[in-house]
Amino acid sequence: DAGVIQSPRHEVTEMGQEVTLRCKPISGHNSLFWYRQTMMRGLELLIYFNNNVPIDDSGMPEDRFSAKMPNASFSTLKIQPSEPRDSAVYFCASSWTDQETQYFGPGTRLLVL
Amino acid sequence: KQEVTQIPAALSVPEGENLVLNCSFTDSAIYNLQWFRQDPGKGLTSLLLIQSSQREQTSGRLNASLDKSSGRSTLYIAASQPGDSATYLCAVSLSGTYKYIFGTGTRLKVLA
């Protein structure tokens, strides 16, 4: 298996633009997590999906953030409009169940100017 | 609120040394604890997962222990190598939840 796949790997955009991050989880995993990592706050859980259904989005910082999982093999995290404070590395992770080992993707490094 | 602390924040050792990384957590009602490795510019790789009913797990030169009552876990690395250089994070999940709370990590550098 190729592992968790994320795209793009790097994104540079200007404030106010829409940003869409993509994730393909490991086949057969039914739990998917989006995290954000910054120097100041470390690794934070943004949203958790189970069987394609959003279970907890309490970590999503604002209404500017939204996430979808239209099927078991694809998820998106969208920021609209983006702001400089959104600059971070965004990770997607998947697991067989929500209490098992999580497998992380390589991350998307986002820079909002 | 669960808080996870890792000490030290950074560590530099000569090759071949045995070393211990520490992780402490404030709420002992955990389901499991994981140790991850993160290389620069990369994602996290799970090293060891310890269920709350277990006291330790071993994988190769790595040994992780868990003491729930004292809210502590240690990651022991034997005979360290330059390839072990990375940031090591511990994460705990609370009983009945899926959420992992991550520590801020220990940045390890093993000198050749």
Image (cartoon, coloured by chain):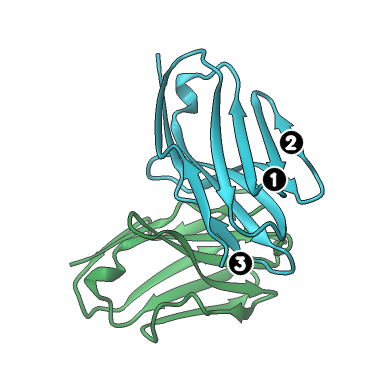
Is the residue B59 above or below the residue B49 in the image? above
Callout 2: SS? strand
Give me the chain that's cyan: B
The one of A28 and B92 positioned closer to us in this rendering: B92
Please name the amino acid that badge 2 sits on.
Gln
Callout 3: SS? strand
Q: Pointer 1: what residue? A: B49
Please name the amino acid that badge 1 sits on.
Leu
Q: Pointer 3: what residue? A: A32
Q: Residue furthest bottom?
A: A63
> In which quadrant is the N terminus of chain B drawn?
bottom right
Residue in view at x 67 percent, y 35 percent? B64
Tag 2 near tag 1, CB within 8 Å: yes
Residue A45's x, y, as percent?
51, 66
Output the chain of dot 1: B
Give me the chain that's green: A
Q: Pointer 2: what residue? A: B57
Residue A61's x, y, as percent?
40, 77
| Mark 1 to mark 3 CA distance (whole Å) | 18 Å
